[in-house]
Image (cartoon, rainbow, N blue to C red):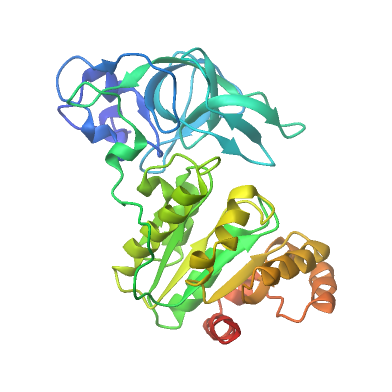
Amino acid sequence: MAPAAELYPVAADWPRRLGSAKTSYITRHVIDLVPPGDELQLAPSTIPAAGDVILARVESIGAHDWIERPDGRKARLFAGDEIVVAYGARYATDAYEAVVPDDFGPCDLVAAGGMAGRVVGAYAGFAAPTRIVPIGQLAGRDGLGLTVRAGAPIAPSPLPPPVHPPVIAVVGTSMNAGKTTSAASLVRGITRSGRRVGAAKVTGTGAGNDRWHLIDAGGSPVLDFTDAGYPSTHLVSPEDLVATYFGLLSAVTAAEPDMVVIEIADGVAHVETARLLAEPSVRATLDGVLFAAGDALGALSGVNLLRSWHLPVAAVTGLVTASPLAAREAAALLDVPVVTTGELMDPTVAAALVSLGSEAA
């Protein structure tokens, strides 16, 4: 078995305490900003804000008994572990609603990607959160507290790129409606048709799993909102949300793909999702929308809502297609194709849907 140092490679000049801590996906761009030396520098305590990067101690294990490391490895957590996470707000209808705490006291690990917060509501039956105790905010070379934004490689932009390839957005009825699977299936289908596909997840809670799914399907490059400096996008202002989308679209476009697939998290009823899709400057960049629905009625209402925002719906897919009977129900209610995720991976089907979206626009 490889020694621990090989399983968890760290920079040789990191402070020893940071090297032994379990760092997280959300904080992956920040760690190299920590000054070298034997002692870990912590910034003076302040009122927490979304994006602040902290060292914390695991007090008790709850729902999240592992943390997602920057390389995707699920590092098992134990009471007493020290972890590097960032404060953020979470909106997850199948898990937690959480806010940024108003003090530096004990709080919760609200997402395995590495987000600290205070749980204010939970899905029935979802386990109590893992409890953590903040030790301090990591400090940069100037002694000031580090944030996720400090290391972000992508800058938000107030304007979209002047020229970009066709863009297909994947949205859905709710969390776990099949959006990421549908987006990855579309990426796979278009890639198999011989075209290069870039992708970005522009809203949600920081987690590498969705990004790696899109990469494994053939997307390149694949970015998410954490690359633009946000641990999550819940409660982010409309202006910042649009700027994040444009920044990610510009960065993906710079790689000159033949098309771009954009995943927008949660459901179309979620406030941030609705604001983003209703923004005229955002709509103007979209050539088509793939809608992932949980059931037939959700498919109908979702398609009607998207059309009320003047968005071109290319097809319905997602969880509803897992049941042939439910898929037939949806098809009977709709005038757009209802396609399974397996069909999306067919290059002929995928290319035809992209063409349909462009024509509808």
Q: Within the image, what quadrant is residue 246 found in?
A: bottom left
Res. 321 visible in picture = no
Q: In this view, does 336 lie to the left or right of 326?
A: left
Question: In the picture shown, does residue 245 fall above or below 125?
Answer: below
Please provide percent x and percent y for residue 88: 49, 33
Please provide percent x and percent y for residue 333: 83, 75
Q: In which quarter of the image is the N terminus?
A: top left
Q: In this view, does 290 lie to the left or right of 263?
A: right
Please provide percent x and percent y for residue 282: 50, 65
Of 196 and 310, nearer the camera is 310
**Residue depicted at 29% across the width and 68% down the height:** 254
- Callout count: 0
Question: In the picture shown, does residue 66 fall above or below 197?
Answer: above
**Residue depicted at 31% across the width and 52% down the height:** 154
**Residue depicted at 48% across the width and 68% down the height:** 261
**Residue depicted at 44% across the width and 48% down the height:** 240
